[in-house]
């Protein structure tokens, strides 16, 4: 028996063509039970332990930290420039690798940890360079972004509905972040407070946020977009 669509030869037991999935049927041929001409797929469920890979990745991150520290100490007799590179590598490890050591990492917990680690890195740079921009510029922006991001993550994880409201509000909150950058930069570096460049990304974020909230409120519009965009 052959497939009526693609012409491939079928066994008498075949009900569907394995190549094009066309239903195999011939009214004059009596179907007999026989083994299929190809082996059946077997699914093997193997549990992969990720800790071996994480162990290797940890040492990959550890290598540039140790090498830069030793190189700096040998050349300068102390820790100078190597602390910046080593801190950057360590910060990347905390953000991208550390959560994978846990079976079910909770982003609500790890997001504040990432912001704290970033804040400590910025604080060290501020102190090492003898500057004073951390408390007047970096710290308030870091706190605002931490609250904004952690709020969005918490709502997305524990609230099952209303994602359009959440992301709409997050865009409006992001608009405030851009304005804060310009304001606190002027305060930190002794410039006149003027809202110049930040108004453009802020307006764009506000428009996007309002658009998402309107879509969430208007159910016919929401349903129409869901069908059009196959969401």
Image: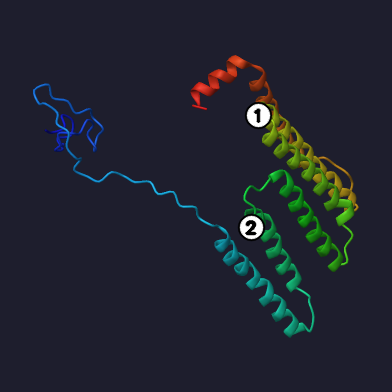
Asked whether residue 196 is in view, the answer is: no
**Position of the N terminus by quadrant:** top left
Residue that appears at 76% across and 48% down: 112
In the image, is 161 to the left or to the right of 128?
left
Residue that appears at 63% across and 21% down: 215
Vertical position of residue 121 compared to residue 197: above or below: below
In the image, is 206 to the left or to the right of 35?
right
Q: Name the secondary structure under disc 1.
A: loop
Rendered image quadrant of residue 95: bottom right
Q: How many marks?
A: 2
Q: Are marks 2 and 1 in contact (CB under 8 Å)?
A: no
In the image, is 213 to the left or to the right of 60?
right
Disc nearer the start of the sequence (2/1)? 2
Q: Residues within 10 Å of mark 1 (few under 14, many from 20)?
A: few
Vertical position of residue 162 compared to residue 111: above or below: above
Residue that appears at 14% across and 35% down: 7
Label 2, label 1: how far apart the Cα atoms are: 28 Å
Q: Residues within 10 Å of mark 2 (few under 14, many from 20)?
A: some
Task: Give the percent coordinates (x, y) of residue 35.
Answer: 19, 40
In the image, is 10 to the left or to the right of 188?
left
Q: Which is more toward the observer, 162 or 72?
A: 162
The colour mode here is: rainbow
Instruction: Find residue 65 and name its label.
Output: none
Identify the residue under disc 1: 160
Vertical position of residue 118 compared to residue 193: above or below: below
Residue furthest to the left: 28
Residue that appears at 65% across and 53% down: 102
């Amino acid at each position: 028996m052959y497939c009526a669509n693609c012409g491939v030869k079928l066994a008498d037991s075949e009900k569907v063509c394995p190549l094009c999935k066309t239903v195999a049927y011939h009214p004059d041929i009596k179907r007999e039970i026989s083994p299929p001409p190809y082996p059946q797929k077997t699914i093997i469920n193997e549990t992969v332990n990720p800790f071996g890979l994480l162990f290797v990745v940890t040492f990959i991150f550890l290598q540039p930290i140790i090498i830069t520290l030793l190189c700096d100490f040998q050349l300068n007799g102390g820790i100078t420039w190597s602390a910046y590179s080593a801190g950057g590598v360590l910060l990347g490890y905390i953000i991208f690798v550390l959560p994978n050591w846990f079976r079910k990492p909770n982003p609500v917990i790890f997001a504040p940890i990432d912001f704290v680690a970033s804040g400590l890195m910025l604080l060290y740079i501020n102190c090492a360079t003898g500057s004073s921009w951390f408390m007047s510029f970096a710290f308030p922006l870091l706190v605002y972004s931490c609250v904004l991001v952690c709020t969005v993550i918490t709502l997305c994880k524990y609230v099952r509905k209303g994602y359009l409201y959440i992301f709409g509000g997050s865009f409006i909150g992001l608009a405030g972040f851009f304005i804060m950058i310009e304001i606190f930069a002027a305060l930190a570096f002794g410039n006149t407070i003027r809202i110049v460049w930040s108004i453009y990304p802020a307006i764009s974020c506000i428009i996007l946020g309002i658009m998402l909230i309107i879509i969430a409120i208007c159910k016919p519009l929401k349903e129409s977009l869901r069908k059009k965009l196959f969401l």
